[in-house]
Image: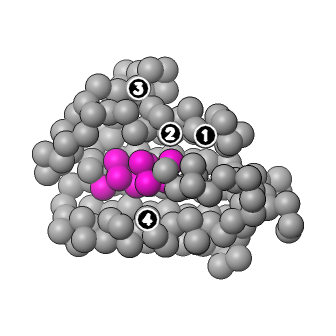
Amino acid sequence: MQDVSVKGLFDPIIRMYQSHLEQKRIKLDLILAADNLTTYTEPNIMKIVLRNILSNAIKFTPGGGSISISCRDKDRYLELRIRDSGVGMSKEELAKLLKQGLQAKAGTDQELGIGMGIRLSLGYLKLLGVELQVTSEENQGTEFVLKLRKAKGV
């Protein structure tokens, strides 16, 4: 565990998915309340979690859609929001995701996945002490809200 820049977590992940974003014409906005937002976390595990969330957002957002990532400083934590304009999930799918994980489901361009990435990420977030809220509505998109620990050095 160490202090790490939120921007520093996202930069390599966004670079990794840049061509897929361009291919699907998905607009990605990274909005940080300040460039120096820093969280106390295990950076490699947090990158796996963020990569899985962003990968699914891209997979389930149709061409021409949008994804926004924002982070702002709250009193006792950093609030990180990842919102997409994708296909969303029904209440039943969302409940199943939070309890046991979803079954494999093809993305909007028939992207393949086995449905394990998000489920593993939920476990990693518990290990890191990160509180998670997920909201989703069919045909309206999905939003992940992570309450990150503030950096110890701040």
Q: Label 3 is placed on what type of residue? A: Gly
Q: Label 4 is placed on what type of residue? A: Ile
Q: Label 1 is placed on what type of residue? A: Leu
User: For numbered disc 1, what is the local secondary structure?
Assistant: helix
* Residue 102 position (above or below residue 74): above
- Mark 2 neighbour density, 10 Å: few (under 14) some (14–19) many (20 or more): many
Residue shown at 35% from the left, 52% from the top: 55
Question: Which mark sits nearer the N-terminus, 2 or 3?
Answer: 3
Is 20 situated left or right of 131 in this image?
left
Work out how far the residue at label 2 is from the one at label 3, CA to CA, in angstroms.
10 Å
Is 103 situated left or right of 149 in this image?
left
Residue 85 falls in which quadrant of the image? bottom left
Is 88 situated left or right of 130 in this image?
left
- Mark 1 neighbour density, 10 Å: few (under 14) some (14–19) many (20 or more): some
Residue shown at 66% from the left, 69% from the top: 5
User: For numbered disc 4, what is the local secondary structure?
Assistant: helix
What range of the chain is rendered magenta? 49-58
Residue 150 falls in which quadrant of the image? bottom right
Q: Which residue is mark 3?
A: 101
